Every structure is written in C-alpha cells, then in structure tokens.
Amino acid sequence: MFVSVFRLLAGLVLLPLGVFAQSEAPVPARRAPNPAWLDALVTTSPALRQHHVGVSVADATTGEKLYELNADKYFTPASAMKLLSVYAGLHLLSDSVPALRYVVRGDSLIFWGTGDPTLLHGDVPSRRALTFLQSRPEKLFYAAIPSVAPYGPGWTWDDYNYYYQPERGAFPVYGHTVRFYGTAGRAVPRIYPRFFGPLTQAAPAGTPNPQDDHVRRAELENRFTVFPSQKNWVDETPFRTSPALLQQLLQDTLRRPVGVVPFRIGPQDSVRVVHGLPVDSLYRRLLRVSDNFLAEQLLLLCSSRLGPDSLSTRRPIRVMQKLYLADLPDAPRWVDGSGLSRLNLITPRTMTGLLLKLHQEVPEARLLSLLAAGGGQGTLRRRYRPVADRPWLWGKTGTLTNNHNLVGYLRTNSGRLLAFSFMNNNMPGDDAPVRAEMERILTQVRERL
C-alpha cells in the first residue's frame, strides 16, 4: 500500500534497499598531503588554467582522501546529478518499475500514471502496461494524477525542439518524442508513432533553417516541419503533451475507447499495481547515455512510492536529503532529476562522498555495470579505452555549455579502486582540450596511485 512522506520520515518503513543494507558511510582517514606530481599536473595545465576546476579523489574501499583541489567549492554538475537520482531509486523503489496503478469500480477500470517512462519508449520499451490494459474486460478510464510542470526549474526554454529535453509527465508514451527516419531526397520521412504523420510537412522552398535541423516543431503546438537532406538520418523531436493528446494516443494504440475521469481515491478503493521492467534496465540506460527524460521520470517514480496524491520532484529530493544524504560533506542544491537545470549545485567532495556511499551499499560488479565504461558505452565510448581488453574507468559525465564534469571510479594498475570527481565550470571555449587533458591526468592517476 502507499506510504506517506510523514510515515516514511517517522518509521522508515517500506523502503526496499535491494541487495544492500543501510549503514553509515565509510569514515575517511586523516587527509594525506596532496601528491606533488598530481597537484602539478592539475594546477599548471594550460588547458585548465582559464576556468574553475575542482577535483576530489578517494580510495573507494577505505574512504581515504588522496587528492583535493577546490573540493569544497560548489560547481554546476550538469548530468552528474543523475547519480543522485539513481541513488534515490535504489532506496525508494523495489526491483521492478511500477508501470501503473489502478482500481476497479464495478464494470470500470480506472488507472493512472506512476511516472514510468518505458511504455513504448524507443530505447527501453515495455508493453506490460499496454498488454494489461488491452486484456481487461472492464471499460477503461484514465485519471490524471496531479504532477509536475512539463519543464523543470532552470531549464533552457529554447531547447524544446531537441531530443534531450522532452516534457515530463505522469503517464508518458513513446518517450514523449516523435521519431523521424529520413531518406536522402525524400521530402517526408517515416514517422513513429504514425499518429503524428498528418501533423508533419516538408519545409517550403526557401524556408530558413539557421540551426541546421532535420525537424523543427512549432514552439507551442504539435506541427512539425522537415527540411531536405542529402543523407539518410534519424531524429527525435519532443511533442507537446496534454491530457487530450494522451487520451487520443492511448485509444489509437489500444484500439479501444479510453475515458477520462478526475483523479480521486476513495476509502473503499483497493489500489493495485502493474509492475514493469527491472529497475536496473532503467538505471543502466539513463546513466550510460545520460538520458534526461528517464532521469526525470525516475524521480517521479520515487514520488509515486511515497504517496498516492501526486507526483512531485521535490518530495523524493526532500526525503533523500533528510534520510540518506545528510552525512555528505556539503549539502547539494538539488532541483531536478537530470541535471538539465543550472540551479543544481554540488561540491566535488560531496560527489565523491556519494560515490563512496554507492560503493559501500551496492555490490561492486552491479554498480560498475550501471555506469558507462571507458572505451565501451555511451558518453565514454571514445575515451579511457581498456587496457589489455579490461576497462579501467567507469563514470558519469556532466556537460552543459561551458561546463564539463566527470565523476566515477578508476581502477589503478595496482588494483586499487578509486572514487573521483573532476569538475570544470565556466570554460570559455571548446571543451575538447579539457576532455583530453582530463584523460591524460586520470591516466597518470591510474599508473601512479
């Protein structure tokens, strides 16, 4: 059954910790002097000279501090914040994603969303909720549970057209994006879902395309314009969400009527849950490729676990900060699930502290499997290549314009596992030299610590 926030805070009940048990974070040993060679690499690097740099390195097993530079200063973490969202999921969710909740009243089945993002998602697709709704004999009614605004605080409004910023919602379908599959010389691409085909047109000759986009959506409505291309291409463009559109998409997909009713749970209602994919499939995808939509929806899934009345980002953040993150060195400013917001702030030593907690609470093999491996997957596939076919770095990048961060774990040549945070903010130009310099420095850390 549901757990209220207040009951959670008082009794800490119904919080599944999976395969790990809640315990105190490792107590770091007395700080050792910064290695002179490492300090010189970081502080004298021309590539790191003109912006703000923060570094924190610790032994992942003992918590011993090995190196710090500006580790107590706050930085904009960007997508590195996704680690906090996954940490929330590990504490607040069970082993599977709750796909939807429902009640049966007579000949009617009333269902509502939990924030599960996987229904017909293009990359982590699940049909479990769909199959359940298709198989039920009752009349179907969707109840729109109160939820968050489509965009988070501090998001960039003019990124509405791009795949990395879909709208948030209680009951997403298709990842809240339209996929376009373009063929060279063909005016209109294949479109999925086909529902949006009639809302798509080829750009008239001479239409300006200053951003060199394949597809542009009208800012406030679901009208899509496709520009000609001499190459084949695939693109994702977010669509504008609304209860009316969701009703249409559900009816089109289920091929049966779906009504809409106000959200209300009565004392006589027996609320039931339909379970979806294993949670690790969600964590792995959102961390490896830095999927903003999955990360935002993850916090809504956590919220659905904490109470039946609404889906909120603030609620799980507040619970996590009070119950599980209060022992971090510096309190993070945490406002969204993905790190899209520039209002998020965190210190390098706090990010490393989170990595220490994760390593203590989650079996190492499972933990490393959730992250992108250097030279292997996602955002690290072109850097930190394996040595003798064995990966040595697993991490989470965090990138916004003028900011690039990398946090994660590093296996040294001696076999020691280190937790590290390497944060760069306010870079005045291209971040490619900074990325290359970070790789050079971390390679030295692998070889010398």
Image (tube, rainbow, N blue to C red):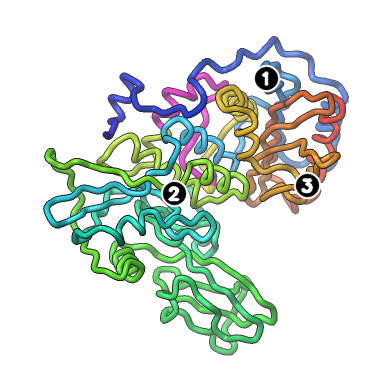
Q: Which residue is mark 1?
A: 61
Q: Is residue 388 above or below residue 195?
A: above
Point out the stretch of residues depicted in magenta.
318-339
Label 3 is placed on what type of residue?
Arg
Q: Find out whether the residues at labels 3 and 1 contact each other: C-beta distance under 8 Å.
A: no
Kindly identify the residue that appears in the image at 23 percent across and 42 percent down.
271
Question: Residue 264: percent from the left, percent from the top?
Answer: 18, 47
Residue 43 is inside the magenta segment: no
Label 2 is placed on what type of residue?
Gly
Question: Residue 381: percent from the left, percent from the top?
Answer: 73, 50
Residue 383 numbered tag: 3
Q: Is residue 90 above or below residue 182?
A: above
- Quarter-wise, where is residue 136 in the image? bottom left
Label 1 is placed on what type of residue?
Thr
Say which of 98 and 88 sits in front.
98
Q: Find out whether the residues at labels 3 and 2 contact each other: C-beta distance under 8 Å.
A: no
- Quarter-wise, where is residue 267 in the image? top left
Say which of 87 and 131 sits in front.
131
Q: Nearer the viewer, mark 3 or mark 2?
A: 3
